[in-house]
Amino acid sequence: MYNSAAFGCDGMSGTGPISSVCPPASGSKTYNRGLSMHSDTIGAPRRARPLAWGCALALGGAIAFAAPAAAQVTDEAAYIFNTLLFLIGGFLVMWMAAGFAMLEAGSVRGKHAAAICLKNIGLYSIAGIMFYAVGYNLMYYGVDQSGGYFGIPFPWSPGELTGDEVIDVAENGYSTASDWFFQMVFVATTASIVSGAVAERIRIGAFFLFVVVLTAVIYPIQGAWTWGEGWLDAAGFSDFAGSTIVHSVGGWAALAGIILVGARTGRFVDGKAIPMHSSSLPLATLGTFVLWLGWFGFNGASQLALGSAADATAVAQIFANTNMAAAGGVVATYLLTLALGRGKANLGAVLNGALAGLVSITAEPLTPTIGQAILFGAVGGVIATFGAILLEKLRLDDVVGAIPVHLFAGIWGTMIVPLTNPDANFVTQAIGIGAIGAFAFTASFIVFLVLKITVGIRLKPDEETVGGDYTELGHSAYPEFLPGKDKAPATS
């Protein structure tokens, strides 16, 4: 996913909905982002990254409009189409927030289900506010002025984002608000990854404070290095839709969190891991399917364009690869858990296998063949399964398996990009993974540590035993299953 655009014919050109009828602009600059099947030619400020997947719903009408010989698409029409694709793409990725909420609510014990739902709707809202107030500009505006390390976090002027203060369609090519919306939901995804890992024992207020820093500072800075055209982008680091930039960053932050918050009470006794059963595997399964659905927007939108037969073929390939990578993760994990469980499969592990397959293909969903996508996803599922076993042996308590899925599989997916994309190389990929990982983990660890020392980040043992629902909300997600518990139990 990149900061590129498709504009009208008046001095602008691109790979978007109108590129087939617009000649390249004189003096325009071509940016090679390591995608072997397309490049972006633009002539406008590259502060945001318009995407073209969403205009599929309007493409039929657009084709009819542009079909006459040498028909010219107006700047206003291009503005409308580009804005539409941002909004639809953003809606699809936003739906992944519901997937994370259901996956986590089904994975935790019942006495923590309402609390985890509050965390998810809260983190999504905080991400929006902070990415508006600080993060968007820190990630994209003036990155070159800092040597490619971060942008300028100036505040928006009244109406600049929500009203597009001066709508110059020839210059902008899209609504700034639509681009911000699409990017904001990616930021929220990173925060959602952390939520599940530290579930059942972290205080909601402390978690929200961490989300403020994650979405306003940590995510935007490393994003500036890459999608903001910073130093890693200049070095040739390639991450199509965010295996590292989104998923591994969430995984590194989650790792810092579980180290400092500690394991759930009773999770490890005398060096042995004690199972803590999920409240609703059907709900977790629903959440996984919702995430799988949202991933088509996550990866498909990052193709950037759907204005030609080549673009349509590329988007179709991305959809197919995304779907089959998840399928590969499911099948491989099912077979692996059958072997490890002596004929008994593990549904929770299989669900994570699907997600690990999706994360594995996210760094490069365009150039692999379908067979390669299945293989990459299968390996991702295996990595996530053994990764969960490793964390357990290290006595690190990750409630939903977020770290094996998003961090371990994210590293795998980013490292294999050069296998199918000749514009990428293993050295640069490793440098990018290491740099982003070191920054994300260190920054997150510091924030969690400061919160631990100042406001406290963990529930008290008796509060944890009662459950986060009653302790922090005063009610339960499932009151009908708690006879005589129509009011909050007393805590010492």
Image: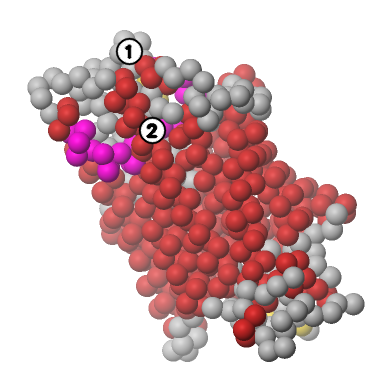
Asked if residue 166 is positioned above or below residue 176 in the image, the reply reads above
Toward which corner of the image does residue 269 lie, by quadrant? bottom right
Q: Which circle marks residue 11 in the picture?
A: 1
Q: Which circle marks residue 83 in the picture?
A: 2
Q: Residue at x 82, y 52 (%)?
A: 451
Give the amino acid at mark 2: Thr
Asked if residue 162 is positioned above or below residue 94 in the image, the reply reads above
Residue 59 lies in the magenta stretch: yes
Give the amino acid at mark 1: Gly
Element at badge 1?
loop
Judge left or right: residue 257 versus residue 373.
right
Task: Please tell me whether mark 1 or mark 2 is closer to you in this view.
Answer: 2
Q: Residue at x 68, y 89 (%)?
A: 483
What colour scheme does the image use? secondary structure
For the residue pair 486 and 348, the one nearer the viewer reads as: 486
Q: Which percent across, then down, holds residue 207?
A: 72, 55
What range of the chain is rendered magenta?
A: 43-63
For the residue pair 244 and 121, the one nearer the viewer reads as: 121
